[in-house]
Image (cartoon, rainbow, N blue to C red):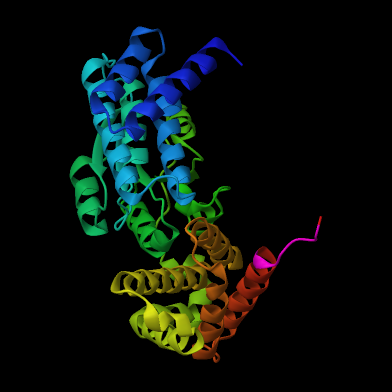
């Protein structure tokens, strides 16, 4: 391990302690001290702040952080980035203009902010638009500023249909699109599926690609169905339009199958309805992409999250059965649900005795 890597890892541990304690002043001291200690600003942003933020998400999923702690830690990290940006001396603009934006409906803005700051450090002129940017407003911005590329960030796979429409709209203006974030898959499969010009696994890779030279202008003129001809069967459209009814049907069916739900508190009922809504949303997105793995991956992750919170993950199986009953006339839906049921059953089955 190099000296720089060791130094960054040590700073990340100290920053983690500060954000978990909710100590913003100490967090800022760690980050600014890392700069004073010889780490360059890009390393501090990506290998200190970025590393801590990834750990925040993992620790929340493992039920080691509450939602409030996760939000507080994220807010501290965002303010720390602002402190660093106000302190470090950036080079003069010597490269092109990049618009950095989150997909509409995407509230996890810190990854996009980190990319924006790294691009500024590399001499780009950057328009950072932040979280949840509606596509029409993004397109208006592109027309008025004429950037060399759009960097689009998305963490939630359920926003892929919106991301697809945004990508094609940006390309129709002649602006190439770089995408990144967990929503596009660990291998970028959904970036390719949705016709993005470039996929980057992280902010450093995105900055590296943009730094090599201008991206070719897209041909444009696509409609979403050009990339996804299976949408012609209307299964995605029908499920997405009736998602609220499906959630109600699942909740009612589970009440009949799981007697313990009769004694749920109002908060437990609310959480159950929210979980069912997430299941339907991810299922609809799997129909949009026609990718079984998107839904099965979400369900196994959900089972882990529920298990960490002491909630019986086995309740997911009757929910899948009820959803299959509601959608028995939809062939692609049945295929995705069958694959999800089989994968979840394997994940929940006890291993061989020692």
Residue 135 horizontal/vertical position (percent)? 27, 57
* Above-or-below relation of 266 to 166: below
Q: Residue visible at 33% across and 47% down?
A: 108
Q: Which residues are magenta?
A: 348-353
Residue 157 horizontal/vertical position (percent)? 44, 59
> Where's the N terminus, which quadrant?
top right
Residue 261 in which image quadrant: bottom left
Which residue lies most toward the front here? Answer: 263
216 or 118: nearer the viewer:
118
| Residue 183 shows in this picture | yes
| Residue 149 shows in this picture | no
Residue 306 horizontal/vertical position (percent)? 49, 61
- Per the picture, the main secondary structure of the magenta-coloured stretch is loop
Residue 84 horizontal/vertical position (percent)? 27, 21
Residue 118 in which image quadrant: top left
* Above-or-below relation of 243 to 166: below
Q: How many marks?
A: 0
Q: Residue visible at 51% across and 73% down?
A: 287
Q: Is residue 224 magenta?
A: no
* Above-or-below relation of 159 to 86: below
266 or 67: nearer the viewer:
266
> Where's the C terminus, which quadrant?
bottom right
Residue 349 in which image quadrant: bottom right
Q: Residue visible at 24% across and 46% down?
A: 142
């Amino acid at each position: 391990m190099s000296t720089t890597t060791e130094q960054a890892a040590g700073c990340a541990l100290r920053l983690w302690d500060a954000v978990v304690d909710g100590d913003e002043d100490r967090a800022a001291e760690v980050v600014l001290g890392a700069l004073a200690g010889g780490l360059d600003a890009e390393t501090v942003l990506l290998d200190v702040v970025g590393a801590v933020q990834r750990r925040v998400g993992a620790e929340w999923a493992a039920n080691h952080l509450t939602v409030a702690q996760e939000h507080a830690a994220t807010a501290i990290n965002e303010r720390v980035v602002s402190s660093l940006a106000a302190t470090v001396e950036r080079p003069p603009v010597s490269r092109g203009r990049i618009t950095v934006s989150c997909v509409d409906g995407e509230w996890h803005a810190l990854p996009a902010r980190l990319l924006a700051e790294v691009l500024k450090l590399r001499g780009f002129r950057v328009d950072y638009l932040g979280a949840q940017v509606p596509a029409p407003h993004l397109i208006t911005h592109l027309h008025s500023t004429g950037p060399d590329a759009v960097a689009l960030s998305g963490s939630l796979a359920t926003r892929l249909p919106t991301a697809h429409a945004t990508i094609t709209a940006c390309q129709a203006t002649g602006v190439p699109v770089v995408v990144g974030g967990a929503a596009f898959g660990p291998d970028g499969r959904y970036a390719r599926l949705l016709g993005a010009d470039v996929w980057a696994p992280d902010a450093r890779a995105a900055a590296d690609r943009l730094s090599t030279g201008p991206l070719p202008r897209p041909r444009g003129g696509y409609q979403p169905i050009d990339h996804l001809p299976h949408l012609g069967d209307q299964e995605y459209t029908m499920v997405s339009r009736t998602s609220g009814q499906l959630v109600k049907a699942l909740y009612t069916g589970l009440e009949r199958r799981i007697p313990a739900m009769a004694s749920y508190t109002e908060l437990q009922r609310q959480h159950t309805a929210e979980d069912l809504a997430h299941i339907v949303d991810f299922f609809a997105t799997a129909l949009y992409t026609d990718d079984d793995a998107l839904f099965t991956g979400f369900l196994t992750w959900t089972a882990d999250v529920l298990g960490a919170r002491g909630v019986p993950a086995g309740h997911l199986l009757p929910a899948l059965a009820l959803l299959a009953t509601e959608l028995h006339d939809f062939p692609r839906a049945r295929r995705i649900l069958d694959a999800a049921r089989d994968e979840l059953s394997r994940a929940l089955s006890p291993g061989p005795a020692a």
